[in-house]
Image (cartoon, rainbow, N blue to C red):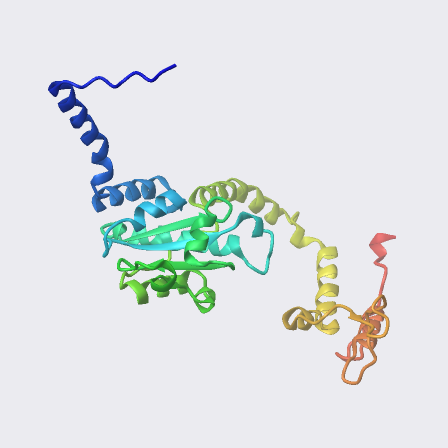
Amino acid sequence: MAISPTPTPTPTAAALLLISFLFLLAPYATPISSDAIVSELSAFQSQSPTGVIHLTDSLLRRILSLPSPRPFNSLIFFDAHQLHSKPELSLPTLKSEFSLVSSSFQFNNPNERSHLFFFDIEFQESQASFALFGVNSLPHIRLIPPTASDMKRDSIQMDASDFSRLADSMAEFIESRTGLSVGPINRPPVVSRKQIMFLLAIVLIWTPFFVKKLIAGNTILHEKHVWMAGAVIVYFFSVSGTMFNIIRKMPIFMVDRQDPSKLYLFTRAQGCSWEPRVKKVVFLDNWKTGYGIHGYWPSSWQ
């Protein structure tokens, strides 16, 4: 089939075609407005419970396309879900502390929320962004100043020392690099207000019954067996050195260097007294205190 020649457009049709073409080019010719990006990020920030925005490759490109200097700082937490199972990295803990810094900054600085945005980015979703920053190991937190143009050269990596005290160290890093004060870290209470009210209600309900039993002498504090067991436990902890082992984190057993499959629960090394000390505790001898403990059978039990 032959190609038919293109008909010559009329002046009116040509004008309409030109106007339509200009409308199509308008979105590409107009630069991205900083106010539009800030408004969008503020909306994402308000939707997040902690104020941390989930960053993607496309959102990062839009942020970096803004003319320098940008009207805000960006702090990015680089994450990888497949590495959360490695305890030596402590990624879940660091991410939780990072979120805590974000929520504290928003709470303490309601008028400066748009000056610093907190982001987290996932490796599987945004490998291009990881390559852009040259991130090849975790944990990794990086600050993008408003004047940064080259992400590898101009962005600031948070050192490992800034993780030492978790959220407090991160807050100090932000204050030293941006001049923005995070303020006090608002950690959630161990027990919530509702839980406290529930416990108080239980105590108030249970108190009259306890007082009644206390007056009648029917509580556990009036049981002689409890006091006897407590005396033995205190004696064991004081004589056996269990508290010393707990405080000093002494090993429970030792591995034989010649045979790794063999374990030593006791040792006869000089300066150690595990074995004789345990034996004396078992027999309840008076080798340390000078007092003897002798078993008896109360006549009321017969």
- Percent coordinates x, y for residue 183 in the rendering: 31, 59
> To which quarter of the image does residue 289 belong?
bottom right
- Percent coordinates x, y for residue 160 in the rendering: 47, 67
> To which quarter of the image does residue 54 belong?
top left
**Residue 239 visible here:** yes
**Residue 51 visible here:** no
Picture layout, residue 63 above or below residue 270: above
- Percent coordinates x, y for residue 242 in the rendering: 71, 69
Relative horizontal placement of residue 210, taking residue 12 as reference (left or right):
right
Closer to us: 287 or 85: 85
Relative horizontal placement of residue 289, taking residue 102 as reference (left or right):
right
> To which quarter of the image does residue 181 belong?
bottom left
Farthest-out residue, left = 11
Closer to us: 153 or 289: 153
Picture layout, residue 159 above or below residue 146: below
What residue do we see at 30% from left, 40% from top? 43
What residue do we see at 40% from left, 63% from top? 157
What residue do we see at 84% from left, 72% from top? 279
Picture layout, residue 262 above or below residue 287: above
- Percent coordinates x, y for residue 205 in the rendering: 51, 39
Relative horizontal placement of residue 66, taking residue 134 as reference (left or right):
left
